[in-house]
Amino acid sequence: MSADFGDNRPDLAAWWMPFTANRQFKADPRLLAAASGMYYRTVEGQEVLDGTSGLWCVNAGHGRAEIADAVRQQLMTLDFAPSFQMGHPIGFEFAQRLTKIAPAGMDRVFFTNSGSESVDTALKIAMAYHRARGEGQRTKLIGREKGYHGVGFGGLSVGGLVNNRRTFVTLPGVDHLPSTYDLTRNAFSRGLPAHGVEKADALEGLIALHGPETIAAVIVEPVAGSAGVLPPPVGYLARLREICDRHGILLIFDEVITGFGRVGAPFASQAFGVTPDLMTTAKGLTNGVIPMGAVFVKRGVHDAIVQGPEAAIEFFHGYTYSGHPVACAAGLAVLDIYAREDLFARGAAIAPLWEAALHSLHAQPHVIDIRNVGLMGAVELSPREGAPGARGYEVLVKALAAGLLVRATGDIIALSPPLIISEAQVGALVEILGGVLAGID
Ligand SMILES: Cc1ncc(COP(=O)(O)O)c(C=O)c1O
C-alpha cells in the first residue's frame, strides 16, 4: 500500500464531501492515507496524533489486526445474509454479547447502520410502543437546543443545531428543551458542571403546553458532543428521568458518542447512574471500521410491541444491512478487545490526568472555557470579531500541520482521543495544542 501519492494526487472533483467547505478544502486538501495505533499518516507522510478517535469512533485505536482477521474470515464464510424473515447466528451472537455490557434491563437490540439510523429507529420504536399500548396519540417528540442526532429527518427535527435545520422541513409535533450551555456560571468546570439542573424543569413547561398524553419521547445526548462537549449539569439527567416517569414519556439517551467507554463506563447511562428506556449507539460499536449502529431497548418496551398474532410482523421497520454479518464480526472482535484490554476502565483511569492536562491550557490566549468528562474535552475560544469560526478553523489547520488532529466546531476545539492513549501522548497532545493556541491571533 502506498501512503504517499506524490504527483499522483487523486482528482478531488467528484466526491461531494459531507459537512465540509468543499471548495476551501479542495483548494488546500488535508488527506489521510494510513493509520496505526494512536496515529494517522498524511499523504505527505506526516505522523498525526489522533486527538478525535477519527470522528468520535475509533475508541480502541487504529489498525487492529484482530478486527481485520475477523472481518476477512466472516467475508469468506458468510458475506451477506438477509435479515428480513431470515437470520444468521453471528447477528444473534453479537446482540447477546452487547446485552452483557448494557445497562440492566436494556436487553433487546435493534441493528442499524449509523447513528442517524439509530436515532430514527428509536423515535419510531417510541411511537410504536405507545400505539401498541393503546396510546397512539402520543406522537410528539422533545429534543434539545444544540442537540445533534444525525441527519435523517427524525434526528434533524429533534436536533437543535440551526445550520443543520434551516434549509429543510422538519417533523411537526416536535419541541425542544433549552440547552444546558451556561458559561456565566459553569465556565472551566471540571467534570459535570454544578449549575443547571433546573434546565430540566423546562420539560414540565413543555408537557403542560402540549399535554402529556400527546408526547412519545424525550431524546437527549447525555453529553452533547457535536455542540462542543457539554457535560450534563449535576442532577440534570436524573431530573429528566423523574419527569418522564411521572408522565409516561419514554426517555431516549443518544449515546452515539458517549457509548463504548467514552465517559468512564461502557455507557454514559451507567457512568451517570440514570437508565433511559432506549439508547442509540453507533461509532465505537465497531470501532468505526465497519458502519453499524444499534438501538438498545428496555425489555418492557420491546415486549409491548412484540406481541399479538405470532404470524404478524410486529414492527414495520428495518434496513437491508441491519445486523450485517461482517459488521457483527467486526463488532464482536471489538468487544473482545475492549474486554481483553479493559479499555473502558482504562478510559476512566486516565481521565483525571486528561482533565488536569486539558485545564492547563486555561491561560492561553482567547480561551473562554475548558470542559471535560471521561476522555472527552473541549477548549472554547472567543470568536474573532465579525468572523465566527475563523479562529477555530485556524487551530484545526495549524494543529494538523503540527501533528495533531482536533475537531473544530465553530470556535470550539473538541477532543476525544482513543481510549488507548498513553500518559505521554496526553502530554504531547496538550503540548501541541498549547503551542498552536499560543500563536493564534
Ligand atoms: C449524538 C449523535 N447522534 C447521532 C449521530 C449521527 O451518527 P451518524 O453520523 O453515524 O449518522 C452523531 C454523529 O456524530 C452523534 O454524535
Image (tube, rainbow, N blue to C red):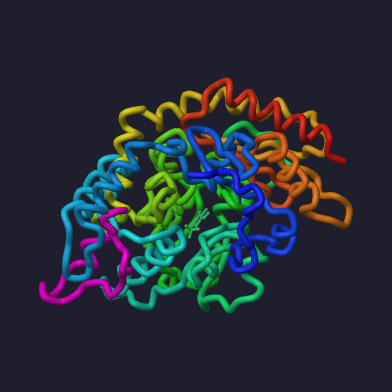
> Which residue sits at x=52%, y=71%?
174
In x, y percent, where is residue 57? Answer: 48, 46
In x, y percent, where is residue 344? Answer: 40, 32
328 or 373: nearer the viewer: 328
> Which residue sits at x=42%, y=64%?
117
In the displayed orientation, state which residue is furthest to the front: 7
* Residue 368 left/right relative to 378: right
Provide the residue span drawn in magenta.
Answer: 301-326
* Residue 85 left/right relative to 429: left
Does residue 48 sit above or below 280 in this rendering?
Answer: above
> Which residue sits at x=45%, y=33%?
264
| Magenta stretch secondary structure, dominant | loop
Does residue 326 sit above or below 23 in this rendering?
Answer: above
> Which residue sits at x=38%, y=60%?
113
Q: Quadrant of residue 10?
A: bottom right
Q: Quadrant of residue 47?
A: top right
